[in-house]
Each structure stands twice: as C-alpha cells, then as structure tokens.
Image: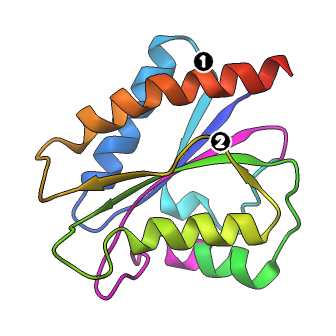
Amino acid sequence: MRKVNLIFGTVYGNAQFVAETLCNEFQGEERDVSLFQHDELDDFIPPQDEILLIVCSTTGQGDVPDDILPWFESLKNSAPYLPELRYGVIALGDSSYETFCRAGLQFDELLTDLGAQRIGELLKIDACETMEPEVEAKAWLKSWKELIDMETLV
C-alpha cells in the first residue's frame, strides 16, 4: 500500500476534523499516512509514488478556504506535470448555495489538469443533510481504500 498524504482546507474546522478522523482510520490499520497542516505546504509537490487525499470545505462564493489557498495557487501557477499521481477528494459544502462543494471541485479540476488521476468518485458531503461529516467520510473511505489496494496490485 502506497503512502497517503492527507491535506485539508477548512474555515470552521469541519474539514480538519474529517481529515484527522480519516488519518486515525489509516493509522488504526497501520497504513502509512501523513496529515499536513497548511503551514507545511509551502512548495509541496505531491510525490507521484504516493497517494493524495484532499478534504476541503467551500467558503464564500465557492472559494478555496484561506488556509489552503496559497498552496492551491502555488500548484496552479507552477503547474507540475503529475501523470503518475493518484488522488481522491472529499468536498464539504452546503447545498442551499449555488456553489455547493465548489472548492473541492476546483481541486479535482486542477489535479486533472496537472495530469493526475482520481481514484473513485469525488465525495460531496452536504451540511444540510448531515451533522457528522466524518461518519459519511469514513463510510466512503472503506471503498476508497479497496480501490487503492487494487491499484497497488496492478
């Protein structure tokens, strides 16, 4: 199993709590995982022999949260070609807004533009439907880990 790098962007802490919960899930299975804080992302280019998982809430008019925006902009501007990178995205949002989960979708679009390939489906968690986004994320993680394990065998 390849190492998983977990990165989150949050405003009120929900995405961080989800990322920490998923990190604990990986660690509980003794899988190699790193949880990055936003101040650790300066000039970080995801290693292509590892897997990237982004957990991101949406703010304002569909914007990427301020804590992770510098990294998003850095990736966008430097545009590293990442054809071997595999990734997943968990987007948190509120479906009562037109820009529901837009920040997570922006990460998905950026990574695709950089040549990376998403593993499985992007998970959208709606604050209007769930008060515990970590529960929904943990359920999604089970099938996502199976997809990761299948990729490792190929």
- 113 falls in the magenta region: no
- 52 falls in the magenta region: yes
Residue at far bottom of view:
61
Indicate whether 83 appears above or below 103: above
Q: Quadrant of the N terminus?
A: top right
Residue type of the residue flagged with mark 2 = Ile
Secondary structure beneath disc 2? Answer: loop
**Residue at the (51%, 11%) spot, across then down:** 29
In the displayed structure image, the side of residue 129 where residue 86 appears, left or right: right
Question: Where residue 118 is drawn, which disc sits there?
Answer: none
In the displayed structure image, the side of residue 55 where residue 76 appears, left or right: right
Location of mark 2 (residue): 119
**Residue at the (13%, 51%) spot, across then down:** 129
Is residue 89 visible in the rendered image? The answer is yes
Of circles 1 and 2, the one toward us is 2
In the rendering, at what x and y percent does residue 116 appear?
Answer: 77, 56
Location of mark 1 (residue): 31
**Residue at the (24%, 32%) spot, across then down:** 135
In the rendering, at what x and y percent does residue 42 appear?
Answer: 66, 68
Indicate whether 41 appears above or below 125: below
The answer to which image quadrant residue 75 occupies is: bottom right
Give the Cα separation between the discs numbered 1 and 2: 17 Å
Magenta residues, as a range?
48-71
In the rendering, at what x and y percent does residue 21 appear?
Answer: 34, 33
Indicate whether 48 appears above or below 60: above
